[in-house]
Amino acid sequence: MKNPFDAILFDLGSTLIYFNGDWSQVFTQANAELITGLKAAGYQIDENKFVEDFRNRINNYQSERQSEFIEYTTEYFLRSVLADQDYTQVPDAVLQSVLRAMYAISQAHWHIESDTLPTLEYLRRAGYRLGMISNASDNEDVQTLVDNAGVRGYFDFILVSAAVGVRKPNPKIFRLALDHWGTPPARAVMVGDMLGADILGAKNAGIFSIWITRRADVPVNRAHLDTIQPDAQIAALAELPGLLNQLGSMEKE
């Protein structure tokens, strides 16, 4: 059977792992950890104002993120808010420490899907090259989630928007992934849950797009249902090997 694809790109959140917490509670706890860490490091800040400014700074850049598909890191926002309060020489180690504590709150609520490891194992044994592209504003957070899920060994690379400065669906981040292998777009597949990021991005990059739908019923996806169409669709990762085999059979015919 001739296989039309050599490489598979995966999204992370709501594709390989899922979130089972309450985001409002997580944000409240994460904010508290951030403030505690900064105060312990000797920074005298107004708690409520600082949190408001920090979250507003992040939210104000959301439109630019979504229109220009560029990435700003959480560390950048944190440093800029501290600078506004005349803390302009904050050591990198301090920022990384408080952000690590902040992200630990949400990390505790991410869990691996039951079919992730069996599917990745099958694909690796079948000879596919696997890579990951994740939109996130903190590279270390993603790397920690990957290690917590125990999936790093299956992937040739973990590409995070925070580390490269651009976000899906910007074709550049997909080209960076393919360049790692030297694989042409027509020989690659992208599997993800977000129509506007994973599916549109793959299409714009000339990559076969597979939409995984089990956790995809969210407002941002509903807004794109009539305008962004995946090349194929699965409900769960366990369906991916069968779909790839089916596509291989069609190629042979």
Image: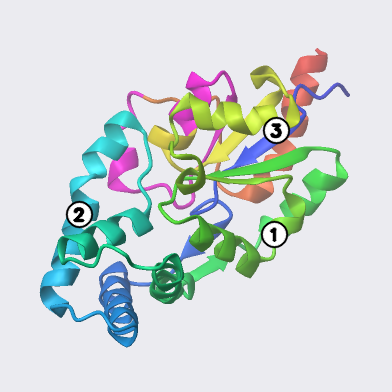
Image coords of residue 84 (percent x, y): 16, 60
In the rendered image, the vertical position of residue 25 relative to residue 245, given as above or below: below
The one nearer the camera, 20 or 39, is 39
Measure the alpha-carbon separation of dots 3 and 2.
34 Å
Q: Nearer the viewer, residue 147 or 78?
A: 78
Residue assigned mark 3? 180
Residue depicted at x 25% and y 44%: 62
Disc 1: which residue: 151
Q: Are marks 3 and 2 in contact (CB under 8 Å)?
A: no
Q: Would residue 186 be found to the left or right of residue 94 on screen?
A: right
* Range covered by the magenta-colored residues: 199-227
Q: Which residue is under mark 2?
A: 57
* Residue 182 in picture, x, y percent from top left: 74, 24
Q: Earlier in the sequence, mark 3 or mark 1?
A: 1
**Which amino acid type is shown beneath numbered disc 2?**
Arg
Q: Give the quarter of the figure containing the C terminus.
A: top right
From the viewer's perspective, is the residue at label 1 or at label 2 nearer? 2
Say above or below: 76 vs 130.
below
Instruction: Tell me what residue is drawn at x 15 percent, y 66 percent.
Output: 85
Is residue 223 visible in this depiction of the protein?
no
Q: Amino acid at mark 1?
A: Val
